[in-house]
């Protein structure tokens, strides 16, 4: 073990490279592969589990607890992300990554052994405890390994990893569930994670800050957890409640109140989990806001695309996953291309503004959706949307990491990830409300337009089968399900009208999805507006220089680092 300067001085007095940059090219490439494997592991888990959840819920008789399989993972991964990011700044990326991946694999193994829903919910929470480290700390490792000018080439690969996982996940989840059992969707994580663990342990050195405070903000951790848990639970409960319900709005208000307390605590903390001083930097704060809004607009809207294909077009769950292939192709292509452009030019503001504009255009196209819209038109809309979204997955990380001192890469990157997750969660809750309200309002109108007599539509309006929740839950032959649900005395009258009823419901569903994309387009335009406030500076060819210390309360004195193999 030896101490070296984190910001070695060149002969002319200018800082040069972070010690991590002195790894051999082969070692850096090996670490990069391991990081991509770890990210693929985390991303694949989310797409593969979604495909198998219906079978899991059936086998474990847990339909009432369905959402908590996802919520428990979301809670623990969202809470722990900023904590891991801060600890990685204090104690190094390597131990945090090893701990995070190990906990994730333990949770995967236990989830695969689950025999009831409560066990699965608990062990998915364990998975999330580990997953909270994988994404933010992995991105911070890239910040350590490569100069700001180089990072674009590699950050772009991360967007591609998520696109590939979204492509492979539905197929792999269906294959393992159908040929072996759903337990194997969790066991498949073990060999991938083992390889990533081994390479990270063998190749990645540990870089620790020397001479800095090791004080851990325990009070901040506790209050942060207390704020995030009720807020996210309230958002989850919105799927079955109203904003005014105590279990929805009440919990969200409690979370916001504790969030205010958390901010007050962080202002006094020696080593805060969230460094509030970073938000005084224009590029950093505008990137955080733009990421939040972009996630708000995208995640809430795109989650309904597979539902559209399943409900209106009659696709299976696996088929619906492949129907969005053009979106993924656009995301993968533009993510990699954007990284290369940033790496070659050192510029990013125009790129991110144009990308958000294209994403807003793509989402606006979807506001013209109808039940009978040609599939080629849908694919074009998806591809355009993906082209705009891809750069946001890579470039915002580059901007944030280039804006902050090397000693704060972990906390800055984890904050970006946190706001991306929160933005997506809030967006999903809001558009869920928009979808339900629009479907309820449009169903009677579209039934009449399809030729169903107004008198019969009025009878349907008060029937539980035709509520928004029931409509979206109907599976199989929609016409047969409707006929079976109406009273026997009117079945003969309804039967000839079944094709018109189905057509009307499908059109109402399509218009409800279109309303969701309208919300997404507005959020994307707001993200574009936030990105205009960025103060673009050429990306440095070295990691040593730092932003003006006054902006974040950072001392200009180089920070010593301890390196251990």
Image (cartoon, grey):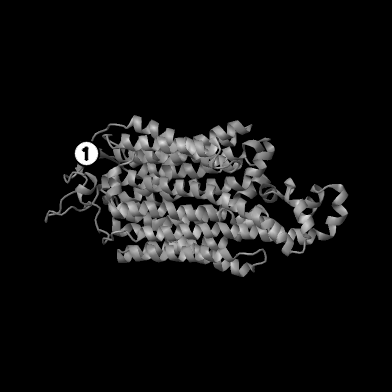
Tell whether 444 sits left or right of 224.
right
**Mark 1 packing: few (<14 Cα in 10 Å), some, or many (20+)?**
few
Residue 265 spot, x, y in % from top left: 32, 34
Nearer to the camera, 536 or 105 = 536
**Residue in the image at 43% along x and 49% along y:** 420
Q: Which residue is mark 1?
A: 2
**Residue in the image at 29% along x and 56% along y:** 148
**Residue in the image at 50% along x and 63% along y:** 385
On screen, residue 565 above or below 515? above
Q: How many marks?
A: 1
Residue 92 spot, x, y in % from top left: 31, 40
- Asked which quadrant contains residue 12, the reply is bottom left
- Asked which quadrant contains residue 101, the reply is top left
Q: Which quarter shows the N terminus?
A: top left
Residue 319 in view of the camera: no
Tell whether 169 sits left or right of 62.
left
Q: Secondary structure at mark 1?
A: strand
Tell whether 449 sits left or right of 263.
right
Residue 538 in view of the camera: yes
- Asked which quadrant contains residue 133, the reply is top left
Q: Which quarter shows the C terminus?
A: top left
Residue at the farthest left position:
12
Nearer to the camera, 310 or 531 = 531
Residue 266 spot, x, y in % from top left: 31, 36
Nearer to the camera, 242 or 258 = 242
On screen, residue 313 above or below 201? below
Residue 381 spot, x, y in % from top left: 55, 66
């Amino acid at each position: 073990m030896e101490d070296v300067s984190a910001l070695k001085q060149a002969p002319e007095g200018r800082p040069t490279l972070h010690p991590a940059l002195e790894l051999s090219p082969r070692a850096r490439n090996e670490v990069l592969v391991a990081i991509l494997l770890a990210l693929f592991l985390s991303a694949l888990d989310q797409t593969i589990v979604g495909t198998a959840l219906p079978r899991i819920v059936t086998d474990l008789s847990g339909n009432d607890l369905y959402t908590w399989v996802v919520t428990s993972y979301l809670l623990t991964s969202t809470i722990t992300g900023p904590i891991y990011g801060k600890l990685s700044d204090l104690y190094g990326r390597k131990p945090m990554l090893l701990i995070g991946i190990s906990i994730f694999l333990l949770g995967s193994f236990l989830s695969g052994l689950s025999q009831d829903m409560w066990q699965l919910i608990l062990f998915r929470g364990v998975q999330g405890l580990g997953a909270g480290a994988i994404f933010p700390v992995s991105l911070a490792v890239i910040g350590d390994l490569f100069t700001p000018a180089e990072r674009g080439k590699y950050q772009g690969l991360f967007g591609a990893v998520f696109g590939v996982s979204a492509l492979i996940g539905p197929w792999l989840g269906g294959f393992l569930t159908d040929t072996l059992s759903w337990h194997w969707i969790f066991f498949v994580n073990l060999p991938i994670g083992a390889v990533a663990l081994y390479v990270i342990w063998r190749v990645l050195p540990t870089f620790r800050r020397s001479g800095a405070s090791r004080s851990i903000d325990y009070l901040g951790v506790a209050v942060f957890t207390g704020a995030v848990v009720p807020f996210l639970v309230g958002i989850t409960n919105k799927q079955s409640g109203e904003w005014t319900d105590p279990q929805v709005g009440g919990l969200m208000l409690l979370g916001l109140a504790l969030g205010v307390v958390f901010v007050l605590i962080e202002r006094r903390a020696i080593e805060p989990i969230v460094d509030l001083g970073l938000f005084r930097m224009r590029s950093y704060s505008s990137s955080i806001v733009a990421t939040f809004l972009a996630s708000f607009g995208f995640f809430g809207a795109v989650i309904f695309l597979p539902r559209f294909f399943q409900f209106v077009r009659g696709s299976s769950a696996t088929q619906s996953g492949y129907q969005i292939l053009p979106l993924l192709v656009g995301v993968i292509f533009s993510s990699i291309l954007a990284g290369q452009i940033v790496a070659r030019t050192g510029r990013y503001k125009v790129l991110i503004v144009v990308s958000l504009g294209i994403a807003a255009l793509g989402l606006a196209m979807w506001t013209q959706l109808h039940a009978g819209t040609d599939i080629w038109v849908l694919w074009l809309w998806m591809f355009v949307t993906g082209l705009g979204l891809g750069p946001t997955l890579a470039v915002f990380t580059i901007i944030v990491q280039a804006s902050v001192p090397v000693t704060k890469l972990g906390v800055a990157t984890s904050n970006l990830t946190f706001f991306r997750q929160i933005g997506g969660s809030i967006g999903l809750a809001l558009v869920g409300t928009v979808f339900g309200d629009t479907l309820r309002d449009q169903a009677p109108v579209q039934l009449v337009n399809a030729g169903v007599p107004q008198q019969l539509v009025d009878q349907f309006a008060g029937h539980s089968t035709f509520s928004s929740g029931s409509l979206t839950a109907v599976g199989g032959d929609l016409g047969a399900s409707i006929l079976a649900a109406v009273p026997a005395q009117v079945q003969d009258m309804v039967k000839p009208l079944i094709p018109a009823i189905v057509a009307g419901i499908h059109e109402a569903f399509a218009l409800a999805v279109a309303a969701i994309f309208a919300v997404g387009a507005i959020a994307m335009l707001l993200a574009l507006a936030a990105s205009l406030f960025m103060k673009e500076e050429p990306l440095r060819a070295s990691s040593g220089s730092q932003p003006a210390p006054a902006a974040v309360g950072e001392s200009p004195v180089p920070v010593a680092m301890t390196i251990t193999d």
